Image (cartoon, grey):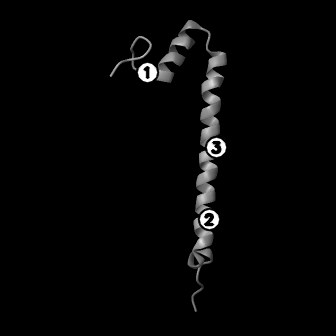
Amino acid sequence: MQRAHGGGPFTGHAGKLLADVNAGHAMSDLRDIVDPLIHYHRTTRRALRAKRLASRLTKPALRRPVEAA
């Protein structure tokens, strides 16, 4: 496997980001990387929640706990 941006423990995005931080010109690049991650995280959580809700609604037995007689 080839190491990007001069080796070290970080490769790819993280390696480039680290190199930029060390060079002192990363703040604008940082948002370019972080914003999509935040967006992805939010949408994934929303999707999982919707999926859970949908499965709960399609299984009538789980909709309400069955009361003991």
Q: The N terminus is located in which quarter? A: top left
Q: CA distance from mark 2 to mark 3?
A: 18 Å
Of all residues, the one furthest to the bottom in this rendering is: 69
Kindly identify which numbered label has been placed on residue 42: 3
Please state which amino acid type lies under the numbered disc 3: Arg
Camera-near label (2 vs 3) is 2
Q: Is residue 56 above or below residue 45?
A: below
Toward which corner of the image does residue 38 lie, by quadrant? top right
- Element class at badge 2: helix
Kindly identify which numbered label has been placed on residue 25: none
Q: CA distance from mark 3 to mark 1?
A: 25 Å
**Left or right side of 41 for 12:** left
- Element class at badge 1: loop
Residue 59: x percent and y percent?
Answer: 57, 74
Please report the residue visible at 55 percent of the width from the left and 12 percent of the height from the top: 20
Q: Total number of numbered labels?
A: 3
Please state which amino acid type lies under the numbered disc 1: Thr
Q: Are marks 1 and 2 in contact (CB under 8 Å)?
A: no
Q: CA distance from mark 1 to mark 2?
A: 39 Å
Please report the residue visible at 62 percent of the width from the left and 56 percent of the height from the top: 49
The 10 Å Cα crowd at callout 2, few under 14, some 14 to 19, many 20 or more, is few
Kindly identify which numbered label has been placed on residue 11: 1
Q: Are marks 3 and 1 in contact (CB under 8 Å)?
A: no
Task: Say which residue label 2 marks.
Answer: 54
Toward which corner of the image does residue 17 lie, by quadrant? top right
Residue 10: x percent and y percent?
Answer: 43, 21
Residue 57: x percent and y percent?
Answer: 63, 71
Which comes before the other along the chain, label 3 or label 1?
A: 1
Which comes before the other along the chain, label 1 or label 2?
A: 1
The 10 Å Cα crowd at callout 1, few under 14, some 14 to 19, many 20 or more, is some
Please report the residue visible at 61 percent of the width from the left and 52 percent of the height from the top: 47
